[in-house]
Amino acid sequence: MFRSRKSTLVACLAGLALVLSGCGGIASSGEGRSVELKAASLLPPNGSQSDMIQWFMDELEKRTGGEVETEVVHGGALLSGTDVLPGMKQGRAEAGQIVPAYFPAELPLNNVNMVPMAGADQAARLLAFQDLADGNDDFAAEFERNGLHLIGYLPNASSTVAFNREVTSLDDVRGAKLRIPSQPQSVVWEELGAEPVFMASEEVYEAVERNIVDGVTFPMDTQVANGITEVAKYMAPDIGQNGGAIFAISQTVYDRLSDDVKAVIDELKGEWYAKTAELLTEYEQQACEKFTAAGGTVVLWDDDEQKTIASATEKLATDVWQTEAAKSVDRSAVEQVWSDYTAAVEQHTGEAGYTDGLQTCGK
């Protein structure tokens, strides 16, 4: 019998060991036996990334008839952002939300997602990353080296920066301390006069509330889901579409699953990007409505400001990522990833009918 959903990929290795000792593998082999899988989610529920993870886990439990029991632990309560990759290797979670920016040495090529792309289609970016995972051997090898079985790239809503002080133009950003998660973004914001600050996502709300930082970059829906917009009432576009996270299962855990469970996982992977596109649109619309209803102000850079940002981004961001990635991977592989990535983004642009929610918010 398929069991009712739980809401958390629960299977510490201790629990898995009991299953392994009884049947020689993780998959169930007798009536009443089940595999417990626990997933670490960094963000609270009710955002596109968190709900994408929850959707996958719920469907995995439902479609395996309870052979796999799942639990998702949200808000970084199981593992913090910088602990997910080592935590999965240690067996503290069987699956997790992995932000490549937290692991530049382990996932140097995946950190291409932190290079800002002005006006990029976020749905197209996800498909481009998947193309790299499917078709670029060096890119795919990063998952193998880190013991990861990729499920998919999580939906990343419009990249924004929320400020806890009035901002009406790019000039108002000068001197502002901004939480920025990656070096390619940081060098551009620094060029524009801001002071970049790195901190884990779990620390951001208090930092904004206490004026430790003046602003924070996050996807549009995450700004609202994390409560950032309760204390930061001005929201503007980031320097380009960037960022993102991966959802993966431990390869060791995956290898021990039954063929029937693996078939369900493949089925869900086939539905993944249609679901991400749906959630992107849904949550950006919701975020816009909640933000504006609470008195939030959307600030859009004018044409001259956009040119200033684009010039700084083009001059600095790509080279920062390529130089850093080349410390761990051959430079030719880095350049090939960039070429494949930009071509794939162009190819997939418009396929999902996605429209940037911040650009249309309040209109």
Image (tube, helix red, strand yellow):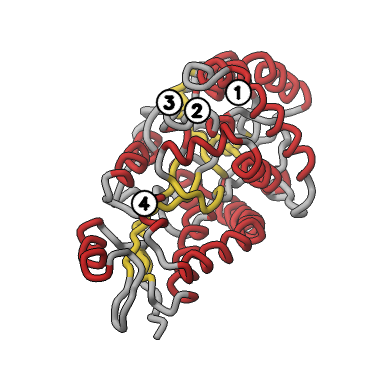
- Crowding at dot 1, Cα within 10 Å, few <14 / some 14-19 / many 20+, comes out as many
> Which of the two marks, 4 or 3, is nearer to us in this view?
4
Q: Quadrant of residue 205?
A: top left
Q: Could you tell me which quadrant the N terminus lies in?
A: bottom left
The answer to whether residue 234 of the structure is visible from this angle is no
User: What residue would you read off at disc 4?
Assistant: 252
Task: Give the percent coordinates (x, y) of residue 175.
Answer: 50, 17
Give the label on residue 108, or none.
2
Q: Name the residue beneath numbered marker 3.
A: 105
Q: In the structure shown, which secondary structural element does the residue marked by tag 4 occupy? A: helix
Tell me which numbered mark, 4 or 1, is placed earlier along the sequence: 4
Q: In x, y percent, where is residue 253?
A: 36, 56
Camera-side residue: 84 or 27? 27
Give yes or no for contact between labels 3 and 2 (Cβ–Cβ under 8 Å).
yes
Mark 1 highlights which residue? 334
Residue at the extreme bottom of the image, as rendered: 1
Element type at mark 2: loop
At label 4, the amino acid type is: Thr
Q: CA distance from mark 1 to mark 2?
A: 9 Å
- Between circles 4 and 2, the one closer to the viewer is 4
Q: Are marks 1 and 2 in contact (CB under 8 Å)?
A: yes
Give the amino acid type for the residue marked by disc 3 in the picture.
Ala
In three-dimensional space, the C-alpha distance between marks 4 and 3, rounded to whole angstroms, equals 22 Å
Q: Is residue 25 visible?
A: yes
